[in-house]
Image (cartoon, grey):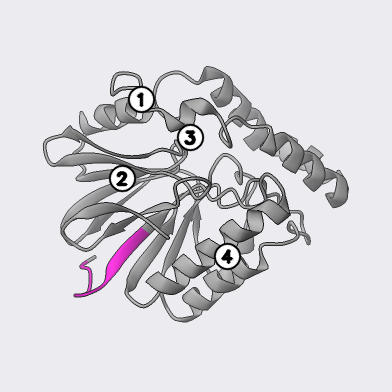
Amino acid sequence: MQITPNKKIYFASDQHFGAPTPELSFPREQKFVAWLDEIKGDAEAIFLLGDLFDFWFEYKTVVPKGFIRVLGKLAEIRDCGIPIYFFVGNHDLWMDDYFEKVLDIPIYRENQEYTFSNKTFLIGHGDGKGPGDIGYKRMKKVFTNPLSKWLFRWLHPDIGVRLGHYLSVKNKLISGDEDVKFLGEENEWLILYSKRKLETKHYNYLVFGHRHLPLKVTVGENSEYINLGDWIGYFTYGVFDGETFELKKFG
């Protein structure tokens, strides 16, 4: 895909809307909607790399209450013909087909490869990648098991959503101190994962979320690992203009 002159591709991740409460989350939602309004004029495409919501579960005919301004703005942008791509994160991994059917936004559960203006990208949320984090990897297998989803669906939505939100807010990714400290290249597991991927295939940019810390690290010849940060404390996003990738802060 060749980027149109004066157009850009935008990336954002880890908004965690709904946390720690809907009331406290609301100003962050307003800020994100303002960002979407600002970028829609020159956006070639928008990539959302997961954890848009702090908890999301789709019943057959019910989705979690709220987030109407965010969903409405995404629908407006799609109606203008701008592609939006959504990568499921660990907090919204129970997403089904609501985005695809209602918003015309495709969702992805695994890394995807793209080429934009002759630059190659590997893009994903980033959870469960690289060495370590064995406990989470086991837990993810349980959460994504069809039987687990079927059993949870039998909970009344008022109970299921409240329980899911409670457990999600307790997750250390919302406020864990380790997520605001750079651990060094030898200990950052997404950096290690990126270097391992580059052993078998070259990418100019390996772009992930999940880590909550904005990072831009050279991991090989003409290869950079990018972490997009979050919309809890950093309000950072990525932008690619066809030649270079930048991390920027909104507001």
> In the rendering, which numbered label is found on residue 127?
3
Q: Residue 181 or 36: which is nearer the viewer?
A: 181
Asked whether 5 falls inside the magenta stretch, the response is yes
Q: Is residue 3 above or below residue 208?
A: below
Sequence-earlier tag: 3 or 1: 3
Name the residue carrying label 1.
Answer: 188
Q: Amino acid at mark 3?
A: Asp
Name the residue carrying label 4.
Answer: 30
Q: Amino acid at mark 1?
A: Glu
Question: Which quarter of the rendered picture does the C terminus lie within?
Answer: bottom left
Name the residue rendered at 50%, 21% in the picture: 133
Secondary structure, mark 4, is: helix
Please give left or right for residue 47 compared with residue 202 in the image: right
Name the residue rendered at 32%, 74% in the picture: 42
Name the residue rendered at 78%, 47% in the picture: 161
Q: Which residues are magenta?
A: 2-10
Count of numbered marks: 4
Judged from this view, the residue extending furthest toward the front is: 251
Please give left or right for residue 59 compared with residue 135 in the image: right
Q: Amino acid at mark 4?
A: Gln
Other residues around mark 3 within 10 Å, as few (<14) / some (14–19) / many (≥20) = many
Asked whether 4 falls inside the magenta stretch, the response is yes
Real-space CA distance between mark 3 and mark 1, rounded to the nearest whole angstrom: 13 Å
Judged from this view, the residue extending furthest toward the bottom is: 80
